[in-house]
Amino acid sequence: MSNPPAPARDSVLQRRLSLSDMLDVPAFAEVVKGFVELYRIGIKVFDDKGTKLADIKIGNGDFCGYVFSFPDGRSSCTGWVGRVKDGPIAPVHGARLPVLDDEPAPKGLVAAPCFTGLRYLILPIMWEGDTLGRIIFGPFLPDDMRGFPSSLTEISKNFDISKAQILVEKIRRAPESTVAKVMLHFAQLFDTLLSAGQKMFLTSQMHIEATLETNRDLEERNQRLEGMNTRLKELDRLKSAFLATVSHELRTPLTSIIGYSEMLAEGLAGPMNQEQVDYVRTIMEKGETLLKLISSILDISQIEAGKVRLSFEAYDVKDLLQSSASSVRPQAQKKGVDIEVKLPAHIERAVGDKERLRQVLVNLLANAVKFTPKGGKITASLSFSDKQPELKSAGYRIVIEDSGVGIPPDQFDKIFQSFYQVDSSSTREFGGAGLGLAIVKSFVEGHGGQVQVSSTVGQGSRFTIVLPQQPTGPVAHIAPPVQTPPEDRF
Amino acid sequence: MPSVQLNHAQRELTVKIVYYGPGLSGKTTNLQMIHQRTQPEVRGRLLTVETHDDRTLFFDLLPVFFSTQNGFKVKVKLFTVPGQVIHNATRRIVLQGADAVAFIADSRRSASPENNNYWKNLLENMRENGLEATHVPVVIQYNKRDLPDTRTDAEIEETKKRGKEPVIGAIAIRGEGVLETLHAVLQSAYRSIDSRAHLAKNIGLTEKEFLTQVFANIDTKGTALEKDFPPKKAAEARP
Ligand SMILES: Nc1nc2c(ncn2[C@@H]2O[C@H](COP(=O)(O)OP(=O)(O)O)[C@@H](O)[C@H]2O)c(=O)[nH]1
Ligand SMILES: [Mg+2]
C-alpha cells in the first residue's frame, strides 16, 4: 500500500512577496509622513499593481488646486499624474535621466518634468531582481526654473500668473540633485524596512505553516496506525476463526481413529497377538493426546475470539476437586507420583461454570504430574474464607503444590500466555503446546477470580486459585486478549 | 515531481536549491561564503529567519538573479533547512519544490550516525513531498575537512562508490569547496529541469549560459572554477 503524495501545499516560500506583505502599511505611512515633514517634499509609494501604499502631500495643494480649476489644467494634470504613477520608469514619454551634478543618487532614478514647470523624481523599488513598485518624490520647484512655461500659462486666457507665482512659492524649491540625494536616503531606509518586514512576514508565516504541517503529519500517522490496528484485529479474528474450524475438522476423524483402535484392542474385530495389541494401544494413547491438544487449541481460539460464555450453576467444590484429582490419578500412579487432596470438614456450595472449573483443576493437576519426577508428591488443598484478601469477598482457595522441577521467577507472567513454554526443550520432554495455563487463567478470571504462582527451582511449584463464592453477574464473558478501544461517544 | 517554476507569461525561471543536513554541519556557512563572494547587484540580502523562542533557525535564504541573453529573468534561490530534530515540519516545507539538494555532511567520523539520520530524513521528506529522489538530484559536500577526526581522501572515495551523487570535500569556513559545491548542485539542477522543461529549446538558455551568468558575478579566485569562470576584473583585463 503506497501513500499518495502529499497534496501540493503552496508555501509562502514558493510565492513572490508583494510590498504589502512585507510592510506594515499604517506604520510605514507614519514613517513617510515624518520624512515629508522633514524634507518638505511630497512622497507617494505604489506597488506594481498601482495600489497606493503611502501618499503624503506638502505645499502644493493651493497651486495645484488653482491649476486644476481650469478645464485644460485639469486634463493636463490628470494625464501627467497617470504618466508618473503608471508609465514606464525610464527616460521615455516625457521623462528623462536626472541631472545629478555628481551628487550620489539611487539606481534607476528618472526625472519627470510636469507641464506646470514643477518636477517629480521616480524611483523603481527593486527587490531580489524584481520591480515591486515605485517611489515618487514631488512635486518640487526646480531651482533652475525661471518663470512658468507656456504649457501652463496657455491653459486659459484667465490664468493669473502673479497669483500662481504666490501659490507656487509654498512648494519647496530645490535642485534636482538635492532631491535625488534625499531620495537615496529614503531608498536606503525603505530597503531596511523591507528586509525587516520580509523577515517578520516569513517568520510568522512559517510558524503557521510549520504548525499546520506538524498537525497534518500527526493526523496522517494516526490514520495509518488506526488502519494497522484494524487490520491486526481482523487478522486476529481470522486466526481464531481458522483455528476453531480446523480444530473441529480434526476432531471428528480423530475420534473415529481412537474409537476404532479401541475396538481393535478390545478384540471386537477378532483376536490379535500381544504385539498387535500393544501397537494399537499406542495408536489410541497418542490419539488421545492429540485430541486433548486439539481441544486446548479450540478453547484458546474461542477465548481469543471472545466467544466463550460461562454458564453458572450451583456446584459442590469438594466434589469437583475430588473428581478432578481422580481423573489424573491413573497418570500419577503410572509415574510413581502421589496425589493428596486436603478438604475442610464442611463447605458452602458455590456458583460457577462447573465444567470449565473442572478443566482448570485437571489442567493444573495434570501439569503438576507432568513436571514432578518419580517419587514426588502433589498436594491439592481447599479452604474457604468469608473474606479472601485478593477478592475482598467470600471465596474459595485451592492450592496445588508439587515437588517438581519448578519455574524461574522471571517466567511467572509468561507461562500464562498462549503457546508459551518455560524453555522450548520442555515441550519435547514433557509434551503439550503451552496452552493449558492460558486457558486456566482465562477461565478463572472469567469467574472474577485470580491465579497466582510461586516456585523454587528444583524444589517445586505452587499454583493458587482464588474463586469468589458467587461470581458477579449471571453470565461471565472472557474478554479477547486484543482490547478493542471504546467507541467514540460524541 | 518538482514544480519547475517556469513562468512564460512573466518570462521568468525560478530555480530552488536546498542545503540540507544535520545541525551545525555548515549549511549557513556555505551561504555566507557565497553571499560574500557574489556581487551585490545580482544577489539579495542573506536572510536568516529564526524562531521566536530560541536561536534555532527556521531557514536561511539567499537569492541570486540574472537575465539571460534572451531577456528571461532567472532567480536562483538558495535555502538552508534547520538541523534540529524538532523542526522536521519546517524542513519539509523548505524542501517543497526543490530542484536540487546540496547535502552538507560533517566529515568527522564521529558525525556518521547524524549524517545517516539526516540522509534518511531527507529521503523520507522527499517522498512525503512527492519528490522522487530520481528527479531531484543531490550533491554531497563533506565539510569540515580541517578538523582532526575527518575522514581521509580514500574514505571519501569509498563514499562516492556507494552512490551516484557527486561528493565534494570542503572547509566551508575558509570557503574551500563551497563554490565547487554550488557549481555541482546548479549543474545538476539545470540538467534536471532541462530534461523536463527543455530550457535550451524553449527559452534558449543553455547549461553553459546558465552557469556562466551565475559564476560571472561570483569571485572564483582561488577555487577550482577560476579557469572556467575567471573573476570579473581578470576577464575584463583580457585583450
Ligand atoms: N572547523 C570548521 N568549522 C566549520 C566549518 N564549516 C562551518 N564550521 C563551523 O560550524 C559551526 C556551524 O556552522 P553553521 O554553518 O552554522 O551550521 P548549520 O547549522 O549547518 O547552518 C559554526 O561554528 C561554523 O563556523 C569548517 O569547514 N570547519
Ligand atoms: Mg544554519
Image (cartoon, coloured by chain):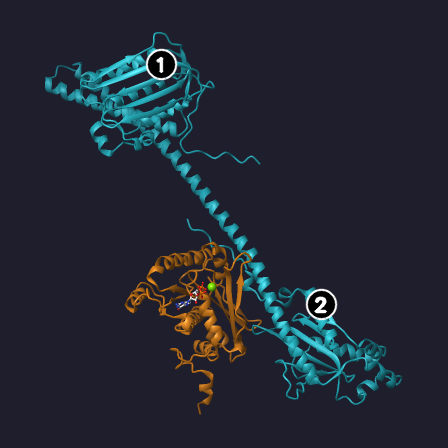
Ligand 1 closer than 8 Å to label 1 CB: no
The residue closer to the viewer here, A342 or A53, is A342
Q: Which chain is cyan?
A: A
Q: Residue furthest top?
A: A345
The quadrant where residue B123 appears: bottom left
Q: Amino acid at mark 1?
A: Ser
The answer to whether residue B121 is seen in the rendering is: yes
Return the residue at label 2. A30
Residue drawn 44% across and 57% down? B125
How many tags in the picture? Answer: 2
The answer to whether residue A132 is seen in the rendering is: no
Dot label at residue A358: none
Dot label at residue A383: 1
Which color was chain B given? orange
Relative to B116, is B87 on the left or the right?
Answer: right
Above or below, comparing residue A429 to residue B71 in the picture: above
Above or below, comparing residue B133 to residue A182 in the picture: above
Chain under callout 2: A
The residue closer to the viewer here, A319 or A373, is A373
Looking at the rendered structure, whether the residues under marks 2 and 1 are on a common chain is answered as: yes
> Residue B48 at what x, y percent from top left?
52, 65
**Which quarter is ligand 1 in?**
bottom left
